[in-house]
């Protein structure tokens, strides 16, 4: 699974953020490694230079082989929490979508 990380101009990502993204997605999406070919990670700071609660935003878009892309997002006070929250939501979206597909195929 290929992971691509994109950020807005207000965020500076360092190695710890990149590592957290990879570890979180590898852990949460392990079950779907064969179906998910790519995950695009979009990180934003909604309030830019101002402080505020839940101003960090993470949008995950999973490219699933032979299916339309699936997405999930989360807002949190920190990037790490937004990434983790979005990853858990994406896991549920994938379970639902790919579970329905398996049911339709009789698997």
Image (cartoon, grey):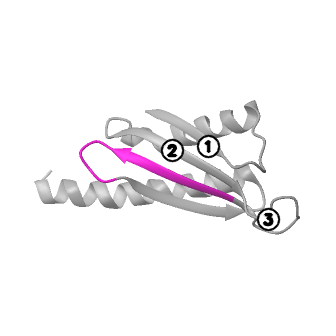
- Crowding around mark 1 (Cα neighbors within 10 Å: few <14, some 14 to 19, many 20+) is some
In the depicted structure, whether residue 30 falls above or below residue 54: above
Please tell me how crowded label 3 is: few (under 14), some (14-19), or many (20+) other residues with Cα within 10 Å.
Answer: few
Q: Are marks 1 and 2 in contact (CB under 8 Å)?
A: yes
Q: Quadrant of residue 45?
A: bottom right
Which of marks 1 and 3 precedes in the sequence?
1
Is residue 35 positioned above or below 10 on the image?
above
Residue closer to the observer: 68 or 17 = 68
Q: Residues within 10 Å of mark 2 (few under 14, many from 20)?
A: some
Q: Which mark is residue 40?
A: 2
Looking at the rendered structure, the secondary structure element under dot 2 is strand
On-image quarter of the N terminus: top left
Q: Residue at x 59, y 50 (%)?
A: 42
Residue at the spot of label 1: 6
Q: Name the side, left or right, on which 46 lies relative to 30.
A: right
Disc 3 and disc 2 in contact, CB within 8 angstroms? no
Q: Which picture quadrant has residue 24?
A: top right
Point out the stretch of residues depicted in magenta.
57-68
Secondary structure state at the residue bearing disc 1: strand
Residue 63: image location, x then y, percent: 38, 45
Instruction: Report the magenta stretch's main SS.
Output: strand
The reply, left or right, for residue 13 in relation to residue 2 is right
Provide the residue designation for mark 3.
47
Work out how far the residue at label 3 is from the one at label 1, CA to CA, in angstroms.
Answer: 17 Å
The residue sitting at 63% across, 52% down in the picture is 84
Instruction: From the top left corner, tell me how far across and down residue 26 is, in percent.
Output: 52, 36
For numbered disc 3, what is the local secondary structure? loop
């Amino acid at each position: 699974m290929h992971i691509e990380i994109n950020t807005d101009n207000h965020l500076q990502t360092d190695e710890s953020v990149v590592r957290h993204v990879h570890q979180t997605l590898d852990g949460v999406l392990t079950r779907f490694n064969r179906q998910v070919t790519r995950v695009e990670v979009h990180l934003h700071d909604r309030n830019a230079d101002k402080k505020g609660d839940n101003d960090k935003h993470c949008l995950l878009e999973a490219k699933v082989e032979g299916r339309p892309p699936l997405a999930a997002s989360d807002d949190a006070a920190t990037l790490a929490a937004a990434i983790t929250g979005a990853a858990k939501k994406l896991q549920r979206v994938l379970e639902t979508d790919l579970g329905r597909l398996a049911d339709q195929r009789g698997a």
